[in-house]
Image: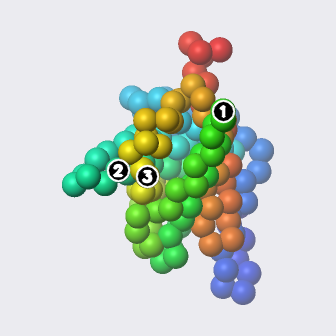
Amino acid sequence: MGIFGGFGKKRIKEDAVDDNYIETILAHSENEPLGISNQNVIYAGYNELGGYYYFQTYIIGTLKMKIKTGAKLLIEGQNYTLDLKSDMDEIESDQIDDFIKGYVTRIDFEIEKEAVENIKRSTIKQLVLTYKKEKIVFTKYVSDEEE
């Protein structure tokens, strides 16, 4: 990842996929990720709290954010598209140095119960995380067993 300063603004640049970096993240996880981008891995799950449903994501990699404007997640699947908004506007990444130099970012998105029931890992094509003027595209992760 390259972080370029310019007039006080940070930009994330995702170059070619760094297979070793991604493989290191995958090797240290017990769970299967939902998607991968060039420098980040996204894990996801659902949770229900007081009748509200959340699509909970953890992004591990080079993504470093500290924002107060929230984020959006576009889930593109076979025969459906979901546009989810983060449940909180303030989002901040936490630094990790255990097995990689990088960050973990937790973002919960509001989701309708019906949408939860329609999303299936097998039908997801890609996920697009948008915040500020940045966009990260995650392609569906396919394990060696699924290939």
Q: Which residue is mark 1?
A: 78
Callout 1 secondary element: loop
The residue positioned 44% from the left and 56% from the top of the image is: 109
Q: Find residue 140 and report its horizontal and vertical position in percent.
A: 62, 34
Q: 133 or 95: nearer the eye?
A: 133
Check the image and report above or below for 92 versus 26.
Answer: below
Callout 3 secondary element: strand
Q: Are marks 2 and 3 in contact (CB under 8 Å)?
A: yes
Image quarter hosting the N terminus: bottom right
The residue positioned 62% from the left and 61% from the top of the image is: 130
Q: Which residue is mark 3?
A: 111
Q: Which residue is mark 2?
A: 53
Q: CA distance from mark 1 to mark 3?
A: 18 Å
Q: 102 or 110: nearer the eye?
A: 110
Q: 125 or 146: nearer the eye?
A: 125
Q: Left of 134 or right of it: where is 40?
A: left
Callout 2 secondary element: strand
